[in-house]
Amino acid sequence: MAEAQTISSAQLCTLTGLSDRRHRQLAGDGYFPPPIKGQYQFAPTLQGLFRYYRDQQSKGSDEFATERLRKTRAEANLAEIRLHKERRNAFDRKAVLRTWENIIMVIRQKLLALPSKMSPRLAYMDDQKAIEADLEKEVRDALEELSKPQAYEDEVETEIQAGDNASAETPEAAA
């Protein structure tokens, strides 16, 4: 009768497909009692194995649900970025950087052009007020010219619209 209530480690390995070492780890984790002289208690061991498999199944489904939630959130974020781009509330980061590079380059060119533009006239002026007025006039003209819309805006708008496809792969957008 004692033999009917126990199962050998070899038989248990054959039934479960797990190694004896793994069975001993599960016994150490408290799923079922450890073996005595290579014999496991039949009912508590089977109950422990079922509990172990249920735990593994619920853990696996929890991980799957977590991954599914992460994927859904990522898709929602991408859809929100696309919506903002369509409403023109957000632009492609690279296109915005390129636009600002162009703006800064134009400002730089205007500022660097002032000395060469002004020096021939200033060389013949003696009155400080006249020099100051002439410099102020040129700076204001340069600033007024810079305040006018530039032609590269149309190119950037095309890049932004074309960038919608590229930004779907990499969700880098700036508001």
Image (tube, grey):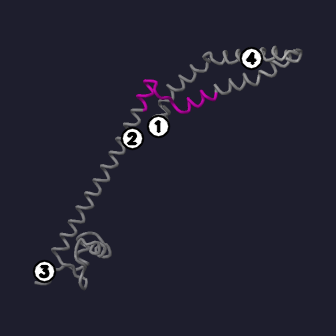
> CB atoms at circles 2 and 3 under 8 Å apart?
no
> CB atoms at circles 4 and 3 under 8 Å apart?
no
Q: Which residues are magenta?
A: 81-101
- State the residue position of label 3: 4
Q: Characterize the local packing of mark 3: few (<14), some (14-19) or many (20 or more) Cα atoms within 10 angstroms.
A: few
Q: In this rendered view, identify the residue nearer to me: 53 or 82.
A: 82
Tag in front: 2 or 4 = 4
> CB atoms at circles 2 and 1 under 8 Å apart?
yes
Distance from disc 2 to disc 1, alpha carbons, whole Å, reads 9 Å
- State the residue position of label 2: 74
- State the residue position of label 1: 171
Where the N terminus falls, by quadrant?
Answer: bottom left
Mark earlier in primary sequence (2, 1): 2
How many discs mark residues in the rendered view? 4
- State the residue position of label 4: 136
Distance from disc 2 to disc 3, alpha carbons, whole Å, reads 55 Å
Q: Characterize the local packing of mark 4: few (<14), some (14-19) or many (20 or more) Cα atoms within 10 angstroms.
A: few
Determine the main secondary structure of the stretch shown in magenta: helix
Secondary element type, mark 1: loop
Look at label 1 and name its amino acid. Answer: Pro
Distance from disc 1 to disc 4, alpha carbons, whole Å, reads 46 Å
Q: In this rendered view, identify the residue nearer to me: 29 or 163.
A: 29
Look at label 3 and name its amino acid. Answer: Ala
Distance from disc 3 to disc 1, alpha carbons, whole Å, reads 63 Å
Distance from disc 4 to disc 3, alpha carbons, whole Å, reads 106 Å
Mark earlier in primary sequence (2, 4): 2
Is 90 drawn above or below residue 28 in the view shown?
Answer: above
Q: Characterize the local packing of mark 2: few (<14), some (14-19) or many (20 or more) Cα atoms within 10 angstroms.
A: few
Look at label 2 and name its amino acid. Answer: Ala
Mark earlier in primary sequence (2, 3): 3
